[in-house]
Amino acid sequence: MAGKTCPLWRGKCREHNCLWYSQIHGKHPSTGADTSEWGCAMAWLPWLIIENTKEARHTTASVDKFNNNMVNSNAILGVLQQIENRGEQPPQLTAEPK
């Protein structure tokens, strides 16, 4: 980052003398290789927001899948309770391999 202009005070980057100059550890999004890099937090902000949004989408998809499974399970339990309330013997449920 040496020689770059600071977006906050429009002068030369102070690097380790600046509180915004931080080290980030993680995995490279394209290669998956471990990375550890120093840089300006203000310059990384757009990239970090995009990464956070991507992770939020994955979380939302997992919650939706879990919700769908719970809805299906509750529907099955509701049918079994109706059968039991009528005094009938519920059918034996077996899991079929996929």
Image (spheres, rainbow, N blue to C red):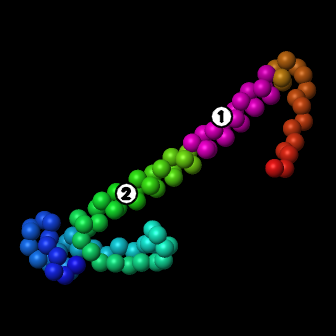
Residue 76: in magenta span: yes
Which residue, given by chain and number where applicable, does mark 2 sit on? 50
Magenta region, residue range:
64-82
Q: Nearer the viewer, mark 2 or mark 1?
A: 2
What secondary structure is marked by label 1? helix
Q: Is residue 56 left or right of residue 47?
A: right
Does residue 17 appear in this view? no
Residue 48 in percent (x, y) is at: 35, 61
Q: Is residue 70 above or below residue 58?
A: above
* Amino acid type shown at disc 1: Val
Which residue, given by chain and number where applicable, does mark 1 sit on? 71
Q: Quadrant of the N terminus?
A: bottom left
Q: Quadrant of residue 5?
A: bottom left
Q: Is residue 94 above or below residue 91?
A: below
* Amino acid type shown at disc 2: Ile
Q: Which mark is residue 28?
A: none
Q: Quadrant of residue 25?
A: bottom left
What secondary structure is marked by label 2? helix
